[in-house]
Image (cartoon, rainbow, N blue to C red):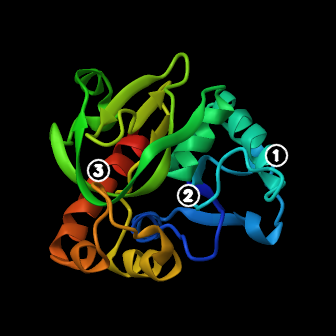
Amino acid sequence: MKLKRVHWLQHVPFEGLGSIEPWLTTRGYSITRSRLYAHEPLPNVDDFDWLIVMGGPMNVDDEAHYPWLAAEKCFIKVAIDAGKTVLGICLGAQLMARALDAKVQKTGTKEIGWFPITLMNLAALSPLFEEHTPVFQAFHWHSDSFAVPKGAVKTASSEACANQAFVFGERAVALQFHLETTQASAQTLIKHCADDLQPGTWVQSAKAMLAEPERFKALNRHMDSLLARLAAA
């Protein structure tokens, strides 16, 4: 019998699991979380099978303002070393990279809205990306980016950001972009992070981001596919 215990790390109250949550609940996974912004404790690594690290507006090394970041990075490394399934999204991906001793820094430009992701040829070597098309639209909201850690395989890029995803081993995946975003969660991000929406080459307006609601359903199908592949691994 496969174990189905998922723990996730939340950095701000307005960024949740998005489409990941219904995928997990309909398949019988138990879900627990640590609200790090509320100083909730991290669990014992033996108490979960999957670790999901979500997004947030802070920098991975901003420990002066968010002291829990230091313990979180160590915790992520322990989970990866223990062979847990680990999925990091946006800030979560950056934290995974930092936990694996890779740099995280400003990209020089914000990437916010709908922009294409291109899978690298090496992505074909990973069963986690078998059902993804070589180029697809993803949702973005970031101004930092990670270097690919030693021993990891870079699997995706975009025109604005060279390193968009990596796989470490068979069960750890980092995504700088978002596949879990729903129309509702996009609206919440727009509400709480409106100051980010300054005009730029890779910054869309709120109206443009929320146009064509069907895009969110297509996006979430990519998320479902990745989750299914992680479950199979």
Q: Residues within 10 Å of mark 2 (few under 14, many from 20)?
A: many
Q: Residue at x 16, y 37 (%)?
A: 134
Looking at the image, the residue that sits furthest to the front is 199
The percent coordinates of residue 169 (x first, y second) are 50, 24
Q: Residue at x 84, y 54 (%)?
A: 67
Per the image, the residue denoted by label 2 is 54
Per the image, the residue denoted by label 3 is 225
Residue nearer the viewer, 223 or 55: 55
Per the image, the residue denoted by label 1 is 71
Q: Amino acid at mark 3?
A: Ser
- Name the front one of labels 3 and 2: 2
Q: Quadrant of the C terminus?
A: top left
Could you say whether the residue bearing mark 1 is in a helix, strand or loop?
helix
Q: Amino acid at mark 2?
A: Met
Q: Is residue 110 above or below residue 162?
A: below
Residue nearer the viewer, 42 or 211: 211
Side (left or right) of 225 relative to 73: left
Q: Residue at x 49, y 22 (%)?
A: 152
Q: Is residue 40 above or below residue 161?
A: below
The percent coordinates of residue 210 (x first, y second) are 25, 78
| Picture quadrant of residue 99 | top right
Asked whether the viewer can see residue 132, the reply is yes
Mark positioned earlier in the residue sequence (1 or 3): 1
Q: Residues within 10 Å of mark 3 (few under 14, many from 20)?
A: some
Side (left or right) of 205 relative to 215: right
| Picture quadrant of residue 123 | top left
